[in-house]
Amino acid sequence: MATDAAKLEATPKAKSDTPKKKGKLLYIIIALVLVGAGAGGWLAFKPKSEAGTASATAEKPAGPRSPALYYKLDPAFVVNFGTEGSARYLQVMVEAMTRDAATLEMLKNNEPAVRNDLVLLFSSQDNTTLLSADGKEKLRAAALEAVRKVIGAEGGDAKLVESVYFTSFVIQ
């Protein structure tokens, strides 16, 4: 009978432990759900970076860009263009922009080649094209490509010449 009494005493304890374990487990599950919901809400509503991705925020932000360096092709270009019966003159001041000192030096050292290619480009233009803003912009893009071609041919990185600007543009 001693064993039956021990069984009876053990049985009520086991039954009373089970609800306590279930109650603790329920509280743990509720806490985990709340923590997960809070973390999900924070991720969903946190401010986005410029790129809009979480991986972009992990990358180092880019530092400030180097200052622009301009090379003025002086004197101004003066070319005649157009058909034989309607000769016109174009005078244009050109400046090339880079952010790399070595590329600026390459522009200085190769100015005769750059000027030659630009003279050929400017003298091959059409009057009606140059009178429109779109035509001038296309000419500016072509001038940039001409400058980049010379720099690339001399072993420089052509993409480092970022832009070409017309600082004066006169058609007569």
Image (cartoon, rainbow, N blue to C red):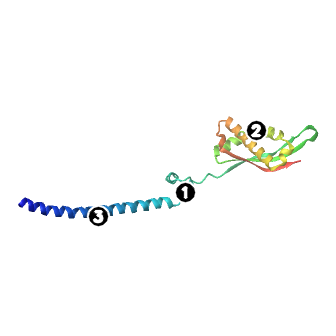
Which residue corresponds to the image point at 72% horizontal and 40% vertical from the top-left?
Answer: 145
Give the mark nearer the N terminus: 3 vs 1: 3
Please say if 43 is above or below 169.
Answer: below
Q: Position of residue 9 (x, y in %)?
A: 13, 63
Q: Which mark is residue 16?
A: none
Residue at 79%, 48% in the rendered image: 134
Asked if residue 71 lies left or right of residue 20, the reply is: right
Q: Amino acid at mark 1?
A: Ser
Foreground tag (3 vs 1): 3
Identify the residue position indicated by label 3 in the image. Answer: 23
Q: CA distance from mark 2 to mark 1?
A: 46 Å
Spatial separation of the CA atoms under disc 3 and disc 1: 43 Å
Label 3 SS: helix
Quick one: label 3, few (<14), some, or many (20+) residues within 10 Å? few
Label 1: few (<14), some (14–19) or many (≥20) C-alpha neighbours in 10 Å: few
Image coords of residue 60 (percent x, y):
51, 52
Sequence-wise, which precedes: disc 2 or disc 1? 1
| Circles 2, 1 touching at the beta carbon (< 8 Å) | no
Left-right relation of 154 to 20: right
Residue at left 10%, top 61%?
6
- Report the amino acid beneath label 3: Gly
Q: Position of residue 146 (x, y in %)?
A: 74, 39
Q: Which residue is mark 1?
A: 49
Q: Residues within 10 Å of mark 2 (few under 14, many from 20)?
A: few
Residue situated furthest right in the rendering: 85
Residue occupied by mark 2: 112
Relative depth, front residue between 168 and 137:
137
